[in-house]
Image (spheres, rainbow, N blue to C red):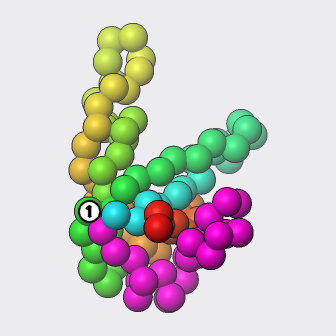
Amino acid sequence: GQAKLAGLWTPTGSRLRTVLRPGHYLVWDRSDPAGSSWQGHIGVVVDVDDEVAWTIEANADRVVSPDGRIYAVCMVERRLDDPRLFGAGRWE
């Protein structure tokens, strides 16, 4: 909401691909469709092309520790047409 009010938010769609740059952040919905409360996820963009963005994300690694938690920070390839992607924000 704060990024929208400041004019620093771009929602998903064709315009997102034209403005997305390294340093922007992407926001996804990671809630459980079976009924859990809303949960978001953020990744910082390090590179982008027409269809994907490469992001640095915490809690995105596919390896889970013995206690069931994820402690890794890793680079992830994300599709820009992901239906759960809300959009991108930037800092200025």
Where does residue 59 sit, x and y in percent of width and height? 39, 35
Q: Is residue 48 left or right of residue 32?
A: left
User: Which segment did they paint magenta?
Assistant: 1-22
Where does residue 34 sit, x and y in percent of width and height? 70, 41
State which quarter of the image contains the N terminus: bottom right
Q: Using the rendered image of the protein, determine whether residue 82 is visible from the camera's viewpoint.
A: no
The extreme front residue here reads: 92
Q: Using the rendered image of the protein, determine whether residue 58 is visible from the camera's viewpoint.
A: yes
Q: Residue at x 32, y 84 (%)?
A: 50
Q: Residue at x 47, y 51 (%)?
A: 42
Where does residue 29 sit, x and y in percent of width and height? 59, 53
The magenta stretch spans residue 86: no
Residue that badge 1 annotates: 46
The magenta stretch spans residue 6: yes
Label 1 sits on a secondary structure element that is: strand
Most foreground residue, 38 or 3: 3
Above or below: residue 4 compared with residue 30:
below
Where does residue 13 sit, x and y in percent of width and height? 54, 83
Most foreground residue, 75 or 24: 24
The extreme top residue here reads: 67
* Number of marks: 1
Most foreground residue, 38 or 32: 38
